[in-house]
Amino acid sequence: MVLTIKNLNKEYPNGVKALNDVSLTINPGVFGLLGPNGAGKSSLMRTLATLQEADSGEVTFGDLNVLEDKREVRKILGYLPQEFGVYPRTSALDLLNHLAVLKGYRAGERKEIVDYLLDKVNLYEHRKKAVSSYSGGMKQRFGIAQCLIGDPKLVIVDEPTAGLDPGERNRFYNILSDIGEEIVVILSTHIVQDVRELCPQMAIMNKGRLLYSGTTDDALELVKGKVYMRNIEKGELPEFEKDYAVISNKRISGKPRIHVFSDEAPGNGFTPTEPTLEDVFFAKIGGQI
């Protein structure tokens, strides 16, 4: 099924316009929603997960009206928020079993589905331990397991890899890739690498607005041949930011390196470089493209 979002708006009582006329079409597969903190990603995720009302707009998932048929949407929804709570002394086995009861599984079915999911997220050996004692990565894997109870057709995960070490992040990538082959999986993140690794489709948001929607490959085409790099000395960045459209800076072997966006070769020691999705992200956020 296809998720279609049309002209979605949400303004909070403090005057913040969290969603400003957002329209998206999301096909089955892993879809990356990229943006800085405060971009409106979590507001969009909470709206799609039926946890808050929109001020206006339409959202459909197949034949379902997401904004009106909340009970039906929840039957086919898996949701992993940025932070989720667990009962402090409850094991993964007992908690998943409890959630399976809430999803309507009968006693004979529950053991099979719970054991299957714990094995899928590589937690079966730790099933009798309290979830509150898990590491960050283990908790996130448990979060994915609870997402998959009920064979969902729409899975929403909000900032799932924040704080994970590289090994845990790779395990998480593999799980999302597996489940995203036939259903819609929306991955909300500010980590560009997550989108590049997982998502053939993506969108970029900032300040409640949609800045880009399309494939990751098409996004890279937007800046192809227009990104230049140069190593600079420590403390020179403010001066370069005055004269060039600096879209990223990082330290390479301890020395600052900047990427700039320019329609023509800027000279002054800059050399062409292969653009990254990070370059697209910062160029979009900065208004260069």
Image (cartoon, rainbow, N blue to C red):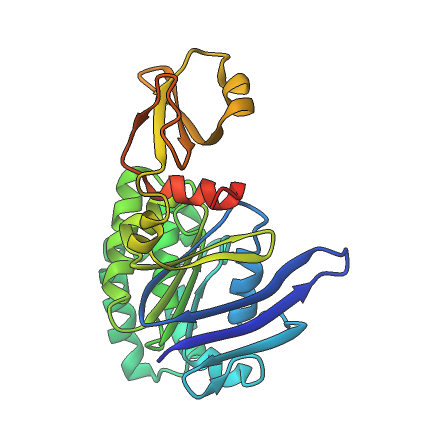
Q: Is residue 83 left or right of residue 226?
A: right
Q: Is residue 211 left or right of residue 274?
A: right
Q: Residue 146: x and y, percent?
A: 38, 66
Q: Is residue 21 visible?
A: yes
x, y percent for residue 245:
49, 31
- How many numbered badges does the structure rendering display? 0
87 above or below 78? above
271 vs 138, nearest the viewer: 271
The quarter of the picture where residue 69 lies is bottom right
- Residue 126 seen in the figure: no
Q: Is residue 229 above or below residue 182?
A: above
Image quarter in which the N terminus is found: bottom left
Residue 177 place in picture, x, y as percent:
25, 59
Note whether 270 is above or below 285 in the view shown: above
Which residue is found at the position 27% from the left and 55% from the top?
123
Q: Residue at x 47, y 30 (%)?
A: 246
- Residue drawn 45% across the image and 66% down it: 79
In the rendered image, which quarter is residue 117 located in? bottom left
Left or right side of 219 for 46: right
Residue farthest to the front, as pictured: 264
Residue sitting at x 32%, y 40%: 276
Q: Residue furthest bottom?
A: 63
> Compared to 25, does 164 lie above or below?
above
Answer with the quarter of the image where residue 46 lies. Answer: bottom right
Please name whichever residue, 47 or 247, is drawn nearer the observer in this view of the structure.
Answer: 247
